[in-house]
């Protein structure tokens, strides 16, 4: 049984911009991934709304992805793969971060995973780094994410650079999905289907 940890934010948790509730298990990309991969794979969902890469949120609190990653890896080992998709919440205006620095935050998380003993036989599991999709038309979150559009369109280049530097697998999600115009940030159910299916192909190629 191959165990895959999916570590992310509300787009991994499954926030639905249509209903403003959580998508059901089989509609989330993690659920789609599990269905397509089939038996022999266990998908571990670790999505948290508002989670950042490495930054403490002075308003929402407890959302630092670096802080929780250590115990998360420890509790779910042994892992065959960690799928990492974070960075969208780093775009919030309160953090004043460039796309470069957001990708550097993701690099810190990749380094933690690669330096861990969360894989089999106390070795590090491989990492599949995902560049989050660019934001779309910001409506509900326009002020909170002011300036996010231009920054998020640079994710592809910077996350690709990080993956190359760290020697990890990479997928640019903007080639697969688009953020919803309902709020500009989250994925609608149809996009979850696309992402889950695309990741299944990528993961089968990685893990065999």
Image (cartoon, rainbow, N blue to C red):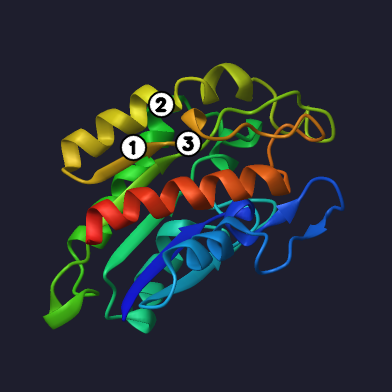
Q: Which residue is at a point 13% across and 73% down the rendered structure image?
A: 123
> In the image, residue 125 lies at what x, y percent?
22, 66
Name the residue beneath numbered marker 3: 173
Dot 3 or dot 2: first in sequence order is 2
Q: Quadrant of residue 63?
A: bottom right
Q: Which residue is at a point 68% across and 37% down the rendered structure image?
A: 185
Dot 3 or dot 1: first in sequence order is 1
Name the residue beneath numbered marker 1: 104
Mark whose residue sits in front, 2 or 1 = 2
Q: Which residue is at a point 46% across and 25% down the rendered structure image?
A: 98
Q: Which residue is at a point 45% across and 71% down the rendered structure image?
A: 43
* In-image side of 144 versus 76 (left or right): right
Quadrant (top left, top right, bottom left, bottom right) of the C terminus: bottom left
The number of numbered discs placed on residues in the rendered structure image is: 3
Q: Quadrant of residue 179?
A: top right
170 vs 93: above or below = below
CA separation in Å, label 3 and label 2: 8 Å
Asked if the residue under mark 1 is in contact with the one under mark 2, i.e. CB atoms within 8 Å, the reply is no
> In the image, residue 163 lies at what x, y percent?
25, 38
CA separation in Å, label 3 and label 1: 18 Å
Badge 1 marks a residue whose secondary structure is: helix
Mark whose residue sits in front, 3 or 2 = 3
22 vs 120: above or below = above
Name the residue beneath numbered marker 2: 156
Mark yes or no: residue 193 visible. yes
Q: Residues within 10 Å of mark 3 (few under 14, many from 20)?
A: many
> In the image, residue 119 lies at what x, y percent?
21, 74
Dot 2 or dot 1: first in sequence order is 1
């Amino acid at each position: 049984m191959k165990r895959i940890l999916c570590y992310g934010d509300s787009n991994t948790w499954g926030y639905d911009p249509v209903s403003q509730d959580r998508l059901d298990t089989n509609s989330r990309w993690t659920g789609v991934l599990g269905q397509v991969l089939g038996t022999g794979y266990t998908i571990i969902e670790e999505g948290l709304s508002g989670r950042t890469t490495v930054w403490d949120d002075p308003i929402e609190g407890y959302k630092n992805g670096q802080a929780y990653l250590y115990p998360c890896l420890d509790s779910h080992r042994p892992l065959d793969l960690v799928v990492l998709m974070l960075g969208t919440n780093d775009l919030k205006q309160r953090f004043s971060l460039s796309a470069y620095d957001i990708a550097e935050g993701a690099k810190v998380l990749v380094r933690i995973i690669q330096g861990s003993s969360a894989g089999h036989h106390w070795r590090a599991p491989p990492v599949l780094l995902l560049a989050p999709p660019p934001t779309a038309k910001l409506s509900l979150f326009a002020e909170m994410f002011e300036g996010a559009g231009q920054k998020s369109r640079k994710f592809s280049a910077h996350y690709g650079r990080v993956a190359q530097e760290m020697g990890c697998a990479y997928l640019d999600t903007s080639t697969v999905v688009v953020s919803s115009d309902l709020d500009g940030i989250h994925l609608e159910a149809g996009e979850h289907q696309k992402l889950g299916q695309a990741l299944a192909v990528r993961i089968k190629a990685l893990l065999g």
